[in-house]
Image (cartoon, rainbow, N blue to C red):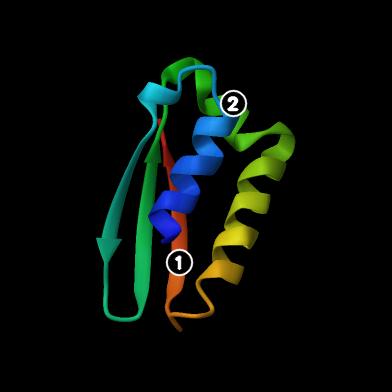
Amino acid sequence: MVKELVEFIARSLVDDPDGVIVNMIEGEKSTILELRVAGEDVGKVIGKHGRIAKAVRTILSAAATKTGKRVVLEILD
């Protein structure tokens, strides 16, 4: 569920939606989501002073409260 949420948000923000790749790594108490986008779209996903990235992480933490797991979003370039 959270993987699809990140994909949807990232595809909405970037110019090249086909370049969005989300890799999910499950752990016991946490889930790590690695987000890769095209090189020229990294700034659009991070935003000025990291505001968009922070907002996406806030949405993820709210969505993850159902599962009881911690969700970490890593934006890879």
Image height of 68 relative to 34, above or below? below
Quadrant showing the N terminus: bottom left
Q: How many marks are shown on the rendered structure?
A: 2
Which residue appears at 48% of the width and 48% of the height? 6
Mark 1 near mark 2, Cβ–Cβ under 8 Å? Answer: no
Which residue appears at 46% of the width and 18% of the height? 16
In terms of depth relative to the viewer, which is nearer, 7 or 33? 7
Q: Report the residue marked by disc 1.
A: 71
Q: Report the residue marked by disc 2.
A: 43
Which residue appears at 72% of the width and 38% of the height? 49
Tell whether 26 sits left or right of 19: left
How far across and how far down the image is residue 3, in percent?
39, 54
Tell whether 8 sits left or right of 48: left
Tell whether 22 sits left or right of 11: left
Q: Amino acid at mark 1?
A: Val
Which quarter of the figure has residue 14?
Answer: top right
Specify which label sits upstream in the sequence, 1 or 2: 2
How far across and how far down the image is residue 12, in percent?
57, 32
How far across and how far down the image is residue 11, in percent?
50, 32
Give the alpha-carbon distance from disc 1 to disc 2, as whole Å: 22 Å
Quadrant showing the C terminus: top left
Tell whether 25 sits left or right of 9: left
Q: Residues within 10 Å of mark 2 (few under 14, many from 20)?
A: some
Q: Secondary structure at mark 1?
A: strand
Which quarter of the figure has residue 35?
Answer: top left
Numbered tag placed on residue 45 in the rendering: none
Q: Secondary structure at mark 2?
A: helix
Q: Amino acid at mark 2?
A: Gly
Image height of 53 relative to 40, above or below? below
How far across and how far down the image is residue 46, in percent?
60, 36
Which quarter of the figure has residue 20?
Answer: top left
Which residue appears at 45% of the width and 66% of the height? 71
